Image (cartoon, helix red, strand yellow):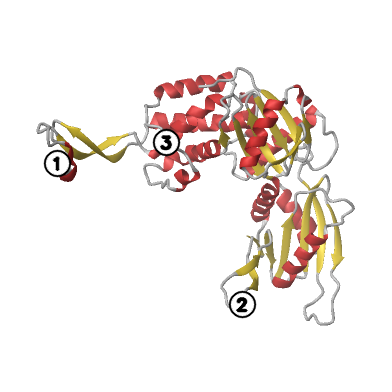
Amino acid sequence: MKLFSNKNIIRVFEHQKLFFGEGGCFAEKHWKALSRYNEKYKNRYFTVLHNGIKFSNYVGVIQAGNLTIEILPKIDKANLDSDTEKKKWHNILLQLLQECNLLKIENAEKANLKLKVKSILDIYVELFLNEVEILLHRGLIKKYKCNAENITTLKGRINFPKHFSVNMLHKEKFYVQHLIYDRQNVYNQVIKEALLIIPSLISNPFLINRLGKILLEFPELSRLAISADSFRKIKYDRKSVCYKEAIEIAKMLLLNYRPDITGGTNDVIAILFDMNELWEEYIFRKLQKAANGNVKVRRQQMQRFWKMNDSTYSKTIRPDIVIDKGDETIVLDTKWKLISDFTPTDDDLKQMFVYNLFWKCKHGVLLYPAIEYQRRSGTYFRFQQQMFEETNCLVATCNVLNEKSMLDKAIGVKILNDIVFSL
């Protein structure tokens, strides 16, 4: 097993560029490993530049060999090179993942201190090891499986076709099938496969020590070829539901891991999240929690807007969030991007116009992140042939952070009071 004695960490913000030599440790070998990884995923996560990488709207962690790159969100362009600013947004990202149920720990700050902050990847590995230790303490699950073998004692039932074909010259043997009750099952195999890749992902002595103890306790199992299908086939029952958390993290590690096929030590793993989706998820959860009385918050309500003649094929539209306030409906679309001078793009405005039309709304809201709450309303022009009432689109910004520069968990109440209820 490959084990790196030291891993370097670089922190960058989304949409930034990283070139050879920056951070003191980004080298050509890392660039090549990341280029191969990005090509496998159709250039989804970043853009490969000459001697560098340009990151996109994905945040999280990428590790290539002994280099860890954390990609952090940001709501302004100030202090991009500040270590203090990067540490702040590292913690905010952990809080955001926690609030969206993508990092299931009681206190992200506490986990950071316990590990003496290494990286987001270290935290996910620690969570995985926590779950595996719990499983070992409870006792690994056993399952029945059918075993076929050619033996000298009669056990189970004889498979006569196979018995006659292989034992014509061995009258003393029986080809039998019988049930075995052991730990050789997909639940334990998936856990073991994830444990086996961890040595190439971490250098934290605390985690390495825990991993070594777990591997000593874990039984020998046959290897399992892992794919996305492996996880789709896993079903949980009363006995196996306790594996769910561990297998979810194992899935994240195994499906995003790419060994160095050149035989080197530049394996790549990426745990990345689309910041647009994170922003939408966070706002929805906070609005839903803040809603009460006659306010109802719904998510991604779908309507068909075009259908091909003589076919069932159709196109649909789906706003991020729909808010019902009594008899009034308001469509809210979240956009994780900086907006200058409160001027939304034509595409965003056209999108909101269609939402207003199909949901029969007078008001639509485009919600952007910023360092303060602001709002500016605009009205769509009416045309003579249109029968519906005048509609408008409010362009609004809200601060992701509270007065302590931490993730604002009261953001839902503020959006409802300062933006939605004031329409």
Q: Classify 265 as above or below 52.
A: above
* Residue of label 1: 164
Q: Element type at marker 2?
A: loop
Q: Where is residue 179 in the image (x, y as percent from the top left)?
A: 23, 39
Q: Classify 227 as above or below 10.
A: below
Find the distance from the CA under tag 1 to the CA under tag 3. 32 Å
- The foreground one among 7 and 342 is 7
241 vs 419, left or right, is: left
Q: Element type at marker 3?
A: loop
Tag 3: amino acid: Leu
Q: Position of residue 121 (x, y in %)?
A: 61, 31
Mark seen at residue 309? 2
Q: What residue appears at the point 82 percent right and 67 percent down from the top-left corner?
A: 392
Q: What residue appears at the point 77 percent right and 41 percent down from the top-left corner?
A: 15
Q: Classify 11 as above or below 356.
A: above
Label 2 or label 3, whichever comes before in sequence order: 3
* Residue of label 3: 224
Q: How crowded is mark 3: few (under 14 residues within 10 Å), some or many (20 or more)?
A: few
Tag 2: amino acid: Asn
User: Which of pointers 2 and 1 indicates the residue nearer the eye?
Assistant: 1
Q: Residues within 10 Å of mark 2 (few under 14, many from 20)?
A: few
Q: How crowded is mark 1: few (under 14 residues within 10 Å), some or many (20 or more)?
A: some
User: Which of pointers 1 and 3 indicates the residue nearer the eye?
Assistant: 1
231 vs 150, left or right, is: right
- The foreground one among 115 and 187 is 187
User: Which of pointers 2 and 3 indicates the residue nearer the eye?
Assistant: 2
Label 2 or label 1, whichever comes before in sequence order: 1
- The foreground one among 421 and 102 is 102
